[in-house]
Image (cartoon, coloured by chain):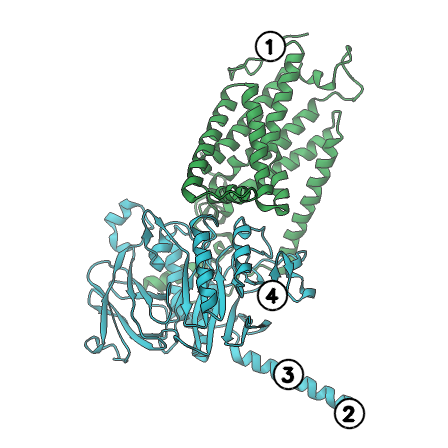
Amino acid sequence: MKTTTLWVLKLSLCGIASLALADEYGDYSEIDLEKVHQRITTLSGSTPAQWRITVKEDASTSATVSWSTLEPEGEHVLYYGKKSTGGDLGRYDEKQECQRSGLYTGAPLKDRKEKKSGLASYHHAALSGLEPDTTYFLTMVSNGVASREFHFRTAPAKTEQLILIHGGDSRSGITARSKVNYMIGQMVEQNPEIWGFVHGGDYIVSGKSYSQWKAWLSQHELTTTSQNRIIPMVVAKGNHDGGPLYGEVFDFIADGDKQVYYYNTTFGDLASVITLDTNISGTGAQEEFLKASLEKLRSESKWLFTSYHRPLYPAVKNMPSQKKVFVPHFEKHNVDIALEADGHNIKRTVPIRDDKKDPTGVVYVGEGGLGVGQRTPKTDRWYTDTKEGAFIGKGHHVMLLTMDRDKLEIKTIMLTGDVVDTHVQKVRR
Amino acid sequence: MAKPILWADGSDLCRYATKQVDLSQAKEDVAASSLEAIINGSATATELSIEGDRTTDDQSRQQLIFRIDRGVAYFLIFVGILVLFMRRRSLIVASLLLIVGGWCVADSIAALLNGGKAYSGMTPYSLAARSVTPFLLALLLLFLPKSARAKSGNGSSVFDSLIRNRKFLNVFDIAARLALASTFLVHGYKAVQGHYPFRDLINLSARRIGLEFSTDSLLIILKVIGYQDILLAVFVLITRSRFVLYWTAIWGFVTAFSRVTALGSPGVDLWLVRSANGGLALVLIALYWWFERGGNELKISQTTPMMTYKPL
């Protein structure tokens, strides 16, 4: 009798727990896209649309606010401040003229000259000297046409908790991408503590196709909450993101004759993300950057992440040449989590050191499900052996990284709201 | 001339090949055009209606792909081992080799269509040596004597009978040289451009002996290697110099083996799959040797006629 009662209690608890989980994240697999897509701003005239915020340095003091307009003419200015003005431009504390504006590359020169208005323009306002842990309200103005008022938060300089979303490969699947983007917006709405979104690359199929970027940019608006909060992004470049548009979309400025896509983003003293570029040599300048970054950031951050596109311990594909370069440095400096994409599946490896399972090693998670069709992970790889504690799966998903000064939790959340994997690790001493 | 139906403008495959979309996205025409209408502000109520998610690959299709992949792997290994023991004409094995060659060509075209990698558009040309080799082996098997014992009267090797067939010689010679030249030309071009995986191969290999190159030095080294590859490709194409072929063979093996020196054991399969880069040059050397051994005169620096055959 006692045993039966105990089982009934256990089953009831499981039922309650699963209901609670489903309620926490919601099921976005069958949402009404007709309704959702009505939130997308029409790209016409000088109306600011396709807004996004990227962070490439200190997330507590800097950010780049970007948007697009169909017409390139006029002044492009960002009005911002710590108080909401309801869009009254005169009452904002600050304004920043866009440092970079231009036509998106994407059509033959002939068309661009004759039909200039058919191509949209990008506008980037890079902000620095912001105050940590502060909500900034902003209105984008192009040629006298103002957007509605948005807001975003800078990261705290000292914080007890940080929550980030990670995902990759939004590159194909128009409907799935919209659904995942909407889910991200809803997650932020339900949990305002979520600070930012780390994207592992492969935004679209062909990096040189403006029409594909145009769709991606408009769909990215769906990550904005209904209260107009924009979630900042930390972006990595994928192998499908070649061509000049990636730099134009995310404001990467050429360093001499080359654009550099590796950089560090810091979140106070709690976490840092080192973004790498797996489309170039792992050795040379990038390796020097990685070594210097790891040496500096390991001692400054409780949690150290690396983010890049091509998986170093892949669940489907072969290992890239950068594995031999990056991994020894990751292990030497005790990177906590390596965020990966490209494989189109769900993966969390066992902790790895010296090519063996080791509790002190680095955990590699990914591999991209923000819209792309999913592949079945291979089951013959030691580092993704589920019997050893690894996880593999497939399906459109995001990863929720919740960290404090003692522990980090990574939840893999499907489009259906199901949490299929939860990984917890303690901070390194 | 009318295009084949699959390549007609607007077909899924055509759009995929021209990198406008990938195949899963090509299925989402309704969603894509609807979204475009929304962004452009020209959407009507019906256009706003979007079909459900059709991009998620179904489980059975994925499983089928894996089974095909695994099956082909076993098949390739089986044919590879079988060929090692073939010393006489075999239509069956030759047919199997034609399938292997077809698979290699399809594989390189798939890499081109998939895109997403630097120079993926050149893949069929850079993999020409490994794609052509199975076809050449099939050709070889078709022209071998019907029986391994059917040697020529003076006790010479079965290969002596091959060099008596001018058609075989010429086809084999030009196909092998074109494939080699194509592979070296594309690799040379990529090296001159400073292709990043080549930089990693050099630096990671050099580290094993305690050397480290700066990016500038690597770019210079790659330029030298690249121009050398291009020169080799040209010489392979316009001459039958044995010196050039020995050089090509050694260089082909060295560059393929750099996968092992750089990456260690994970590089072994990458090395083996590139065996044809040097191996094809060795085969040509052997062919010329047999040809001259039969009392024939090898024309060193002419491309046509390929070879003059003087009957014994």
Q: Which of label 3 and label 1 is nearer to you?
A: 1
What label does residue A15 carry, if any?
A: 3
Q: Chain of mark 2?
A: A
State the residue position of label 2. A2
Residue in the image at 65% along x and 85% along y: A13
Crowding around mark 1 (Cα neighbors within 10 Å: few <14, some 14 to 19, many 20+) is some
State the residue position of label 1. B297
Residue in the image at 44% along x and 58% along y: A292
- N-term mark: 2 or 3: 2
Are discs 1 and 4 less than 8 Å apart at CB? no
Residue in the image at 77% along x and 92% along y: A2
Q: Amino acid at mark 3?
A: Gly
Compared across the picture, whether A388 is left or right of B229 comes to right
What label does residue B104 carry, if any?
A: none
| Position in image of residue B176 (x %, y %) | 58, 26
Crowding around mark 2 (Cα neighbors within 10 Å: few <14, some 14 to 19, many 20+) is few
Compared across the picture, whether B14 is left or right of A70 comes to right
Query: For the N terminus of chain A, which image quadrant?
Result: bottom right
Can you tell which chain is drawn cyan? A
Q: Chain of mark 1?
A: B
Q: How far apart are the alpha carbons under marks 3 and 4?
A: 35 Å
Q: How far apart are the alpha carbons under marks 2 and 4?
A: 43 Å
Q: Which of label 3 and label 4 is nearer to you?
A: 4
State the residue position of label 4. A360
- Residue B14 visible? The answer is yes
Are discs 2 and 3 less than 8 Å apart at CB? no
Q: Amino acid at mark 4?
A: Thr
Query: For the C terminus of chain A, which image quadrant?
Result: bottom right
